[in-house]
Amino acid sequence: MKIAKTVKILQNHLNLEREAGNRIGFVPTMGALHEGHMSLVRESRRTCDVTVVSIFVNPAQFNEKKDFDNYPITIDEDLKQLEEAGVDYVFIPAPEEVYPEGLEIPPTELTELKDHLEGEMRPGHFEGVAKVIYRFFDTIGPDKAFFGQKDFQQTVVVKKVAQQLGNKTEIVVCPIERENNGLAMSSRNVRLSDDDRQKAGFLYRALVKLKEDCVYKPLTEALTHTRKFLESKPDVEIEYLEAVDGNTMEIVNDLSNDFVVCVTVVRFGGIRMLDNIILKDK
Ligand code: AMP
């Protein structure tokens, strides 16, 4: 496994890979790796010849400085896991390498996406995500890039960036990896106490119940029921719980669209728990 800290060195390696006819898979991460990240790595290894993983805590996508400063960093363990998984290249750039002075990154047209739901709760977040992904896709030129369904709105944003760059990179969305109790794996889960981490499975159970309810109840009624259930739990605060069109993130009130996802964030145990469930996918 080779570690590249500059764009130039990574590009030199990847140019040779391309000349050898190898297809490049790319998994962008912010480190503090867990099974969720590793499932993306496995999918890249399964479907591409060469896998590049980036570890970069992107300052541009943090709207709270405290969250950025406290973001967990576990680089030694990360490298060990990536090596064991058979990753070919790890890209660990410094911020100046990603955003050199004077470099203009063309903004992605995100329209309502950037101020809606997760975008409304985290102003500037998706502009920061689009910026780093543009820079990575532009310099790495991957054939495929792998993202988790966990950050559902992010996958919609990333598809826009790929489109902006001429759809040269196929976006592959991989299923959510969960802990035994259903809690979606996240680097921020380490901030939960052991007790809260055990209890936190309630959110996934509520989402599964919602999906079951949708079979015999109108969507709006099922959503109201889920909101009431979550609000009745001690120390739980809903930031949002909405059903959206999975291609546009527009809020929907029934299941008539082809692709409908329930996206949610609840605050519990001092963290924002982000989760979602696909209610319908044709
Ligand atoms: P992050 O390091 O949080 O930026 O995440 C890097 C990638 O891993 C993103 O595409 C995430 O959606 C994905 N990811 C994070 N958690 C999970 C999970 N529990 N299951 C699957 N993918 C995940």
Image (cartoon, grey):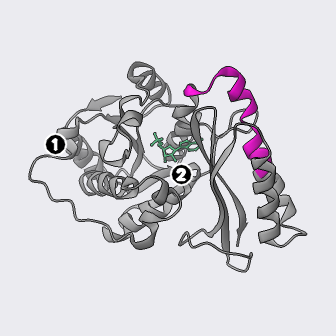
Residue 166 can be seen, yes or no: no
Residue 50 figure quarter:
top left
Q: Tell me how far mark 2 sits from mark 1, CA to CA.
A: 30 Å
Residue 6 figure quarter:
top left
Write the residue at 40% across / 47% down.
26
Write the residue at 29% across / 30% down.
3
Q: Which residue is mark 2?
A: 151
Q: Magenta includes 201?
A: yes
Write the residue at 58% across / 49% down.
150
Direction bottom: furthest residue: 256
For the C terminus, the image quarter is bottom right
Q: Nearer the viewer, residue 99 or 234?
A: 234
Say what amino acid the circle numbered 2 marks.
Answer: Asp
Under circle 2, the secondary element is helix
Q: Nearer the viewer, residue 41 or 150?
A: 150
Q: Nearer the viewer, mark 2 or mark 1?
A: 2
Percent position (x, y) of residue 146? 48, 51
Q: Which residue is mark 1?
A: 8
Dominant secondary structure (helix, strand or loop) of the stretch shown in magenta: helix
Direction left: furthest residue: 102
Instruction: Please state the extent of the stretch shown in magenta in the rendering.
Output: 191-206
